Amino acid sequence: MPHRWGMAVDLDRCTGCEACVVACHAENNIKTVGDAQAARGRAMHWIRVERYWDGEFPDVRLKFRPVLCQQCDAAPCEPVCPTFASHHTDEGLNAQIYNRCIGTRYCANACPYNVRFFNFFNPTWEKPLHLQLNPDVSVREVGVMEKCTFCIQRIKATEQQVEAENRSLKDGELKPACVQSCAPMALVFGDLNDPESQVSRLSRSGRGERLLEDVGTQPKVVYLKHQAQA
Amino acid sequence: MDRRGFIKLTAITGTSATLASCGSPENQLIRFIPDEDLTPGIAEQKPGVCPLCGAGCGTTVRVMQGDTEVVRNGQAGVVTVGLAKKLEGNPTHPVNQGALCPRGQAAIQVTYHPERITQPHKWRGARGSGDFQPITWDEAIGELVSHLDTLALGKQASLACWTRPGASTRHDLFALFLARFGAPPPTSFALFSDDVLRRANLMSFGREQLPTFDLGSSRYVIAFGADFLGTWNSPVAQSAAYGRMRQGRPGIRGAFVQVEPRMSLTGASADEWVPIRPGTEGVLALGLAHVILRDKLRPADAGGRAGALIDGWSRGLADYTPAAVEQRTGVKAVRVERLARELAEQRPSVAIIGGAPLAQTNGLFQALAVNALNALLGSVDTAGGVSFMPQAEPAAATSPAPRPLRVVAAGILADRSPVQVLLLDNVNPVFATPQEWHVRDAVLKVPFVVSFGNFVDDTSVLAHLILPDHSFLESWTDARPEAGAHVALATLAGPAMKPLHQTRATPDVLLDVAKRLKQPFKPEFPWQSFDQMLQATVGEDNFATATAQGWVELKGKVQQAQAAPSRSQAAPARDAQFDGDPAQYPFYLLPFASQAFLDGSLAHLPWLQEMPDPLSTAMWSTWVEVNPQTAARLGIGDGDIVEIASGHGNLQAPAVLSPGTAPDVIAMPVGQGHETFTRYASGRGANPVKLLAPALEPETGALAWASTRVKVSRVASPDGRLIRFGGSMTEPTAHR
Amino acid sequence: MTKADRNITEDLLRPLLTTSWRFYALVLVLFSIVLLGVGSFGYQVYNGIGVWGLNWPVFWAFDITNFVFWIGISHAGTLISAILRLVNAGWRRPVTRCAEVITAFALMIGAMFPIVHLGRPWLFFWLMPYPSEREIWPNFRSPLVWDFFAISTYLTGSLLFLYLPTIPDFALVRDKTTGFRSKVYGALALGWRGTTRQWHRLESAMQIMAIAIIPVAVSVHTIVSFDFSMAPVPMWHSTIFGPYFVAGAIFSGIAALIIAMAALRKFLHLEQYLHPVHFENLGKLLLMMCLLWGYFVFAERLTTWYGNEASEMAVFWATQQQNFAPLYWTMITCNFIIPLTILSFKKLRTISGCVVASCTVVVGMWLERFLIIVPSLSHKYLPYSWGSYRPRTPEVLLLIATFGAMGLLYTLFSKFVPIISIWELKVGEQPELTEPHETPDEAATLWRTHP
Ligand SMILES: Nc1nc2c(c(=O)[nH]1)N[C@H]1C(S)=C(S)[C@@H](COP(=O)(O)OP(=O)(O)OC[C@H]3O[C@@H](n4cnc5c(=O)[nH]c(N)nc54)[C@H](O)[C@@H]3O)O[C@H]1N2
Ligand SMILES: Nc1nc2c(c(=O)[nH]1)N[C@H]1C(S)=C(S)[C@@H](COP(=O)(O)OP(=O)(O)OC[C@H]3O[C@@H](n4cnc5c(=O)[nH]c(N)nc54)[C@H](O)[C@@H]3O)O[C@H]1N2
Ligand code: SF4
Ligand code: SF4
Ligand code: SF4
Ligand code: SF4
Ligand code: SF4
């Protein structure tokens, strides 16, 4: 059976620290756009930590919610792409072929979660920052759409290693960069086809809900609600 | 493609278009498209040490082969070398348990920073102009040696070293080096130092160190101003424990209350957020203790030594009735009663104090109050409570005590203790001290200033000589965390990659200099290189373990609790004093450590500049948090430029209307506002430290950085200075 | 050969045969404007599309607004002329060609934007099905690929529809000119001699095209609307979008036609042929479309408001009351209040009245497209990801250049082709000759108009 990768985000554990945000930059060669471009709304954060204020002083609350590509089973970003650059893989991932993308940005408009980011300019790395670039991840050129891949390079590497060692994958063995960096373990990644995996068990939790589920995207990321104090 | 293939494909295409609604036949089409066809490179994992704060987290460094341009002896060329690609938390490390904070994630950019100093430099032109001239290592070390040779040995004052807090063998070496000149040990300086808490812990518990919290077993946590999930103490360890407290135990979810006048990253996660008048946190802690004692929820003698230090403890803290507490703190009496009951009943419970409450003129009293509350709750050295991590004995004797930076600077300026040579080790006090300390003038007055840092910052720009260190990934590094785990340990690692530039490891430079002095040390240092010193310090076996796994438990070297102080040494219950007339300066200024830059020492890392602040979502900019009602009263709109003025300085910055900031508080992150700190940080934003009154916590002499009052006025409309990632502040729920 | 016929021929061929300095000046000005647009595009390709004001999450703005707007304008021509031909409205005769030309050029301009707006425009051909040696096909589920088919079909049809009734006029010009010009027009006339067989063929071809082009035109703007309504974006994902877009397209198309006709009338001195009654009739049509458009907007807004779906209400209030409200109410004024006021009164339905109303409608319809795209994208679901948009110079230049291009193409066309169908006008002047003549001689007297 092919894997079906999914993620659980425990909002009761997430502290909003943003380690996942920087970890994703470090792993996935996401460019730093700089202040001028950031001011124009071109900053790229494949995973972002949304924060919402609720109430007024002194009865004020604040909620954090990490949002990354939800790897929708019915992904609106896929059918609209004229070149198949945004497509579905056998493992249920929403994958992006940068070479095929011609930059219509239609997928980004169609994505209800606004998790797709566009290369408005060619990326630059001031030397020697380029030496940090991860050789397992393509650098995206101008005019190309990009987004969270569930760290596909790590998935492939681990799958290949598992195959070479002729064994099956252990739950928790494979961690995307954001998951690996999350100290309170708010992010859990794994195989939804394995009913015993931690992510499967958490997906069945009563606290679980899916973001914008009513849009019909069938996301594979499940959010475990912040638990109110008993 | 032949005609047949064409027809076949047309057929597939047509069919797939028809069938599009049933299944995904288009996937059959795209098998012709090259997938992101990657062959993963071969990576090697090496242990490392995160150097960015005192928490001393262990890392794993992913190293892969790559080509780099190098210049060696004036010859340029391309070589294939192992390059660090990514830092992860070391999964075996007892402190950070496999995770890193966002700053730790970005630490790798220190190594690859485009403005790292690549070779020794010598000052030229006006001091502070940033005009440096490259020189060779021989010249550079020769220069340092010749200046050290002129020092009158044994004259305490003539050599000084400023460094950052945090125990390490590197620190020990500096201390030994200075001791040979008869100088006091290096002065550790950090704006957000926790010296007040260390002193309080010494008094209450006999342990002069930061506390470790076993949150994973706690049922109830109350924190006073401590940003323990973001920037304070050992944030990764604490966040990991926090996750377990919330959802790590079947059926049990720990409750968490945060007491602070401005909602911090940590406060945002609290079940209950209790705003409080600044400087009265200790009063609330004692109010809670009062209720517990009054209702006999816990035995009074549980307060033990920590309780005994508090005036009136034995009389049941009669001055701290809920009504009195409400009067002084602004926290409702019923709430005090309820919180006290919850604390006493939902045990194990623990109280945490850190940050601004300690940076008041009554900081020590506040810390002692919370310590006493913990003792009363029976939460000291117990599961789910507060404890102290065993510590290895320092290699170097710490007598005489190090002199505070403020005192050294004042001494220089008053010609009382003229420093001839000042060594700067990765510390930037010119940025992080109040203007009235005149640290910049003091540094300018020192005849010879040497900086070992990797970057030219507000302080090292004043240096005469720059001897750039290797980055932490290129050299032997170690740290001895003082909190965050339950065993004494050293985080220790060898170089993960070859040096990129013509830099040298600072400890090796010190060892080299020691040998080249006109009058070499007697006895000379027994180590040829720093790794030998590390090996000798931790022991042969430990060293092998450490180099393999990145850390080692230091057994049998546990620091013993120290004797109890006498009652008279305790801090009297005292109200916090604020600088500035409330009529003229109606707001409390609350500077806070930025999640991205801590005290500003990381503002040069582009990833952290572009990381949205978790609350304001600001990138590449600074801001001032103003309560929306206050803003409305003052005619300040979101993003408007405001002027903040204290009796000591003024600055302009964009306003962020923040519902989590009390109406009488103006909060501002520390971190931006560097004059000199690489292209990413220089001239960006404003530095609230320059508003601070030079007020001190009287018992410890620590800077009371939260005790300044300010006034605020709107000066201009939004001008694009504030760059935010997030859109709406709120999420509308229902419309009907 | 009546005197009237001779006048028609002379008046309508005058622009082709004589050239004043004003023509050169106008062409120069328009050409410079177009050049600005080309330069702006070059700048954008060289630097990256970041030179525009687009951002996260507003990934479309002026680009797709221009696209939808110009495709909408294109509905003036072919659709109106086809309907008028089918119902055989006599007053159509001087109007049809002006209208059909608008279609052809507006489509060309509009169709450029799906290419111009690409992040990597040099790969535009990946939108098309072509026999790639990698056996890669476009994704036929993507509305952008549907656009490609719809627009290319419409463009082909419209060009044919424009060309067919121009053949007799080309023949006329061929016969009126000598040398090289005569040869070129001769080629374009496809050997037209005005025989009965040729007339019959032309008539039936026109009939077929008029019938065929109507569903094509309707489908084109429906498909353009699918670019939006197929995506689950608040206030895009709406069943009303197909007819709403078509109505809007015809609305803006008629407005464009009125403006073009007024300009021709003035600059080419065609007062004799384009009468106030033509404007009055088109004005009535415009009024009808204005009411229809208003009805669609009302229906769309009311159902959204009543449905009260949170994500849609965010967009709704953004346009109705918040940051986009000034633009929204300008649009309502331009598209509804002003045209309704002017066109409802016979006294105001003069040529200048119609032109004023048309100008506001053109502005209003451009705003309408902008307001469909940008507020939805900037207020899409999760409020943390909301954003805003401000255009920057390169995209403003591109917008201006599209009008320049329209003007330039129109000017050149009316320089080289009779902008009013000469033969249709003549047939209109002599109703008894509506039917083609039996003998070639009779036809010859009609069409061979040697002085
Ligand atoms: N030094 C060195 N040179 C080598 C090799 C080597 O090992 N070392 N390997 C050789 C080998 S084995 C190979 S196969 C070649 C590979 O060389 P290339 O064939 O040049 O391979 P790519 O770099 O994948 O470039 C393919 C291009 O196709 C574009 N593309 C993607 N989808 C489509 C599409 O649908 N239509 C069109 N028209 N273009 C599309 C991409 O944007 C990209 O620009 O390199 C050869 N050259
Ligand atoms: N990440 C990434 N992966 C890719 C591609 C890509 O562009 N990027 N391209 C894909 C493509 S198009 C291709 S063709 C494949 C190529 O993939 P491979 O076929 O794996 O190609 P190489 O790695 O170039 O060479 C294979 C080995 O052959 C050895 N070799 C060289 N000469 C000889 C010889 O005479 N005899 C023998 N026995 N061995 C020899 C080389 O030393 C090398 O170890 O990679 C595919 N995978
Ligand atoms: S790293 Fe984990 S805790 Fe921190 S913001 Fe991301 S998901 Fe939340
Ligand atoms: S979240 Fe957005 S980008 Fe990711 S699969 Fe769903 S629609 Fe596509
Ligand atoms: S931007 Fe790229 S991935 Fe997105 S729809 Fe267009 S071609 Fe496809
Ligand atoms: S799964 Fe990987 S690509 Fe996706 S957000 Fe996490 S780190 Fe980024
Ligand atoms: S807390 Fe963060 S910055 Fe400090 S040592 Fe740990 S990872 Fe590094």
Image: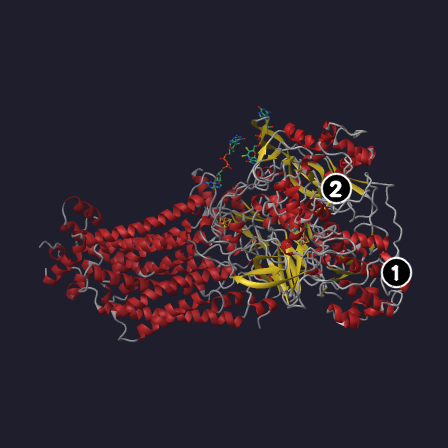
Label annotation for residue B168: none
Reading the chain from its start, which is encountered first: label 2 or label 1?
2
Q: Can residue C205 be seen at all in this image of the molecule?
A: yes
C169 vs B648, nearest the viewer: B648
Label annotation for residue B186: 2
Question: Label 1 marks which chain's residue?
Answer: B
Label annotation for residue B308: 1
Task: Specify the farthest residue to the left.
Answer: C451
Image coordinates for residue B105, horizontal then vertical, percent: 66, 45
Image coordinates for residue C438, horizontal then vertical, percent: 14, 58
Q: Amino acid type of disc 2? A: Pro
Q: Is residue B151 above or below residue A195?
A: above
Q: Quadrant of the C terminus of chain C?
A: bottom left
B146 vs A113, nearest the viewer: B146
Residue name at image x 43 percent, y 63 percent: C242
Near mark 1 (Cα within 10 A), the count class, few <14, some 14-19 or many ≥20, is some
Residue name at image x 22 percent, y 53 percent: C23
> In terms of secondary structure, where does tag 1 sit?
helix
A88 vs C346, nearest the viewer: C346
> In terms of secondary structure, where does tag 2 sit?
loop
Residue B677: which quarter of the image? Answer: top right
Near mark 2 (Cα within 10 A), the count class, few <14, some 14-19 or many ≥20, is many
**Relative horizontal placement of residue C198, taking residue B707 as reference (left or right):** left
B434 vs B218, nearest the viewer: B434
Which one is closest to the eye, mark 2 or mark 1? Answer: 2
Question: Label 2 marks which chain's residue?
Answer: B
Q: Is residue B230 above or below residue B188?
A: below
